[in-house]
Image (tube, grey):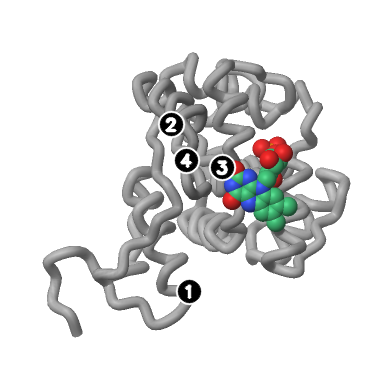
Amino acid sequence: MNKQITLALTGASGAPYALRLLQCLVQADYRVYLLASSAARVVLKTEQQQEWPGSPKELSAYLCRQYGAIDGQIVACGKEEWFSPVASGSAAPKQMVVCPCSMGTVSAIANGTSDNLLERAADVVIKERGQLILVPRESPFSAIHLENMLKLARLGVTIMPAAPGFYHEPKSIEDLVDFMVARILDHLGVEHELTRRWGYARH
Ligand SMILES: Cc1cc2nc3c(=O)[nH]c(=O)nc-3n(C[C@H](O)[C@H](O)[C@H](O)COP(=O)(O)O)c2cc1C
């Protein structure tokens, strides 16, 4: 397995996007370093009725079972696991997605706080000039949110708000989730057939 990526979940609404993205990355043979903030766990419980194991080792095993991944393909990391590969430019994956991304985490990343492993991992991807994709969800955005996102966009970070389109005629929530996940996979360069593309025949 030579493709690797960091997937971080934070406490914005939109846990289904993250779970579907994780499934697609596993199916595409990525090793996924997984980070989840405390608030992300609250959102997971609220939106998906999922309570993940607390210890990174148990969470890794649980998610590998859940997604049919091979042992070690999903590596959950604790928020102060400073010796994780994602904490250093010498070892971190060059691609990272924060999905969903809270305004709190947008601010921490925009200000280089690096106060936990998730924020440090994003800081590393920016400094190493890798690919960082944020999937923020808030409405409306305040000037603080917009300024933080503009700062990041100017640094080359991709701001991809959780704002699914309707031109693929979604019939279900899964269709809306797939719309967003498809756009994220497109940017990552992962092949998929999740949704019909713009300009292609309707049926
Ligand atoms: C169920 C739930 C939904 C939330 N939705 C959002 C949201 O959509 N966007 C957002 O920026 N914050 C949202 N929050 C608030 C964040 O979780 C909170 O600001 C938290 O401190 C973010 O921490 P984190 O960035 O470390 O995950 C939500 C919180 C809960 C419990």
Q: Are marks 2 and 1 in contact (CB under 8 Å)?
A: no
Name the residue that disc number 4 marks: 141
> Which of the marked residues, 4 or 2, is nearer the chain's N terminus?
4
Mark 4 or 3: the one toward you: 4
Q: Are marks 4 and 2 in contact (CB under 8 Å)?
A: yes
Whole-number angstrom distance, CA of label 4 to CA of label 3: 13 Å
Q: Is residue 169 visible?
A: yes
Residue at point 76% right, 65% down? Answer: 50
> Which of the marked residues, 2 or 1, is nearer the chain's N terminus?
2
Q: Are marks 3 and 1 in contact (CB under 8 Å)?
A: no
Q: Amino acid at mark 2?
A: Leu
Q: What SS does tag 4 mark?
A: loop
Q: What SS does tag 2 mark?
A: helix
- Give the number of the disc on residue 146: 2
Q: Amino acid at mark 3?
A: Cys
Whole-number angstrom distance, CA of label 3 to CA of label 1: 20 Å
State the image coordinates of residue 161 (x, y, percent, origin top left): 42, 47
Name the residue that disc number 3 marks: 101
Whole-number angstrom distance, CA of label 4 to CA of label 2: 6 Å
Q: Amino acid at mark 4?
A: Phe
Looking at the image, residue 168 sits to the left or right of residue 180; the answer is: left
Name the residue that disc number 1 marks: 174
State the image coordinates of residue 43 (x, y, percent, origin top left): 71, 56
Q: Are marks 4 and 1 in contact (CB under 8 Å)?
A: no
